[in-house]
Image (tube, grey):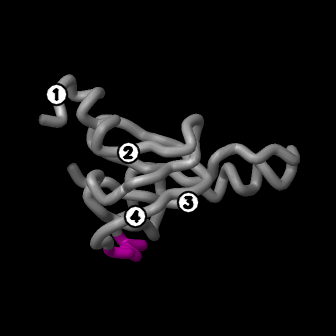
Amino acid sequence: MKARIHVNQHIIRSNRKSGLKEPTLTIKTSRKNIRANSVNIDGPCQIVYSPEKPLSCGATVWIETDTRHIQQVDHQEPQWNMDREVQEVLGVGSD
């Protein structure tokens, strides 16, 4: 499954004003959005700049990769496999 990772500038501005450290990265799939402060990509990826056709959230720069290459995200759990999470959301096994 394709994933797009982008930086949410609105949250960066909000964090500056409030002193909080809300996650600034968004990992988008066709099924789910995950927010994080750190993401490890262990495989091929592409950085895209598309000001003429931004994402629906308004992002004009993002990273595209496959969810199975996203190995670690620092949200609630220290180690997290995006592909496993997507499988759970879709209700399929990882056989």
Give the Cα separation between the discs numbered 3 and 4.
15 Å
Please rate how many residues cluster around mark 3, counting C-alpha atoms within 10 Å: few if below 14, some from 14 to 19, many from 20.
Answer: many
Residue at screen point 47% across, 56% down: 58
Q: Secondary structure at mark 3?
A: strand
- For label 4, the residue is 41
Which of disc 1 and disc 2 is earlier in sequence?
2
Q: Quadrant of residue 29?
A: top left
Give the Cα separation between the discs numbered 1 and 4.
23 Å
Which of disc 3 and disc 1 is earlier in sequence?
3
Give the vertical position of 6 relative to 52 (above or below).
Answer: above
Residue at screen point 36% across, 45% down: 82
Which of disc 2 and disc 4 is earlier in sequence?
4
Please rate how many residues cluster around mark 2, counting C-alpha atoms within 10 Å: few if below 14, some from 14 to 19, many from 20.
Answer: some
- For label 2, the residue is 81
Q: Amino acid at mark 2?
A: Asn
- For label 3, the residue is 7
Give the vertical position of 66 relative to 78 (above or below).
Answer: below
Q: Amino acid at mark 1?
A: Val
**Image check: 61 left or right of 65?**
right
Q: Position of residue 56 (x, y in %)?
A: 39, 50
Which of disc 4 and disc 3 is earlier in sequence?
3
- For label 1, the residue is 92
Please say whether residue 26 is one of the residues in the magenta stretch: no
Q: Start and end of the magenta stretch?
A: 46-52
Q: Amino acid at mark 3?
A: Val
Which of disc 2 and disc 3 is earlier in sequence?
3
Check if mark 1's residue and mark 3's residue have beta carbons within 8 Å: no
Q: Nearer the viewer, mark 3 or mark 2?
A: 2
Q: Nearer the viewer, mark 1 or mark 3?
A: 1
Q: Quadrant of residue 92?
A: top left
